[in-house]
Amino acid sequence: MNKLLRDKKAIIVFIAPAFLLFTFVLFVPICQSIYYSFCDYNALTPPEFVGLKNYRKMFKDDTMVYAMKNSIFFLIFSCISQLIMGLILAGLLTNIKKGRNFFKNVIYLPCVMSSAALGLLWMFIFSPKLGINQILAKFGIEGPLWLMDIKGFIILPMWVIAYVALWQYVGQSMMLYMAQISGIDKSLYEASYIDGCTKPQAFRFITLPLLKPMIGTAMSLNAIGSLKFFDLIYNMTEGGPNHHTEVLATHLYTQGFKYFKYGYASAIGVVLLVMCLIMTGIINRIFKTDDEAM
């Protein structure tokens, strides 16, 4: 192994495919997007440099305000709800013997299903005259307009979509926490029980501290996923009604692929990239763990 590590040609051979893939699939497009964000570009004519015009335009764009507000809401809701629900589910499933694999697979199943198909499914479930409202009507109850009510600071459709996203992706957090819990030395729990520690106390003082690195990883994934949230919300509302359910990703898509404003869409993409980097940095700093503690 040491001989292989000293062989520079072997190192280059192994690193080159991943390096080329990263360069041409990620790094180069990111650099192009940053450049286009300072240009007026519609793909039909050469990019024309306009400086900060696209960024100044964001402050006058009402849809951008909706998109930013909704994306921040998704960010906060996803990080908190998936942290709490993921820990609860991981703790419960770790302590049961019968049916563990069945419940684990059922909870994780939505993660691997098509978000486009699930978006259409939930759109019908929350339709004004179908799904839940149809069931409520049989009991003489008039259901709300789940995906069209625009009252309130955070409107009802955003809460509905947020809970659907929680249902779909909580299995990912649960699996990460269960994987970390399974690696904790069982002798730590046995020693705590001998000292009179209850299971809730063991979870609080043993499991949670040792889960800290995985919590940081899971929250980083949740934060990035919530900020670039697109397919589910696009298939359920397409950003409506009247752009009230737009998020940054849907607004970027609309500006770029419907109106062909690639310069402005690139500027939104840069804002999205910066927000992802900032949130990742904050989460990594909060959940930073000393190597000696591990």
Image (cartoon, rainbow, N blue to C red):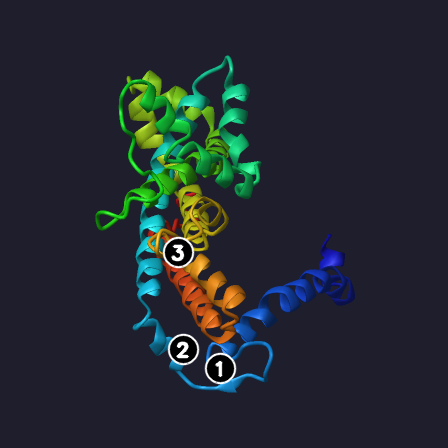
Q: Gap in Å between the C-alphas at discs 3 and 2?
A: 18 Å
Image position of 6 with respect to 46: above or below: above
Is residue 287 visible in this depiction of the protein? yes
Name the residue at 40% across, 51% down: 223
How crowded pointer 3 is (Cα within 10 Å; few <14, some 14-19, many 20+) is rated as many
Name the residue at 73% across, 59% down: 14
How crowded pointer 2 is (Cα within 10 Å; few <14, some 14-19, many 20+) is rated as many
Name the residue at 37% across, 37% down: 163
Residue 136 picture quarter: top left
Residue 55, x across and y down, in percent: 37, 76
The C terminus lies in which quarter of the figure? Answer: top left
Residue 257, x across and y down, in percent: 54, 65
State the residue in front, 275 or 116.
Answer: 116
Q: Which residue is mark 3?
A: 247
Residue type at numbered disc 1: Cys
Q: Which residue is mark 1?
A: 39
Residue 54's tag is: 2
Q: Gap in Å between the C-alphas at discs 2 and 1?
A: 8 Å
Q: Would residue 111 appear left or right of 198 to someone viewing this image?
A: right
Residue 102, x across and y down, in percent: 54, 19
Residue type at numbered disc 2: Asn
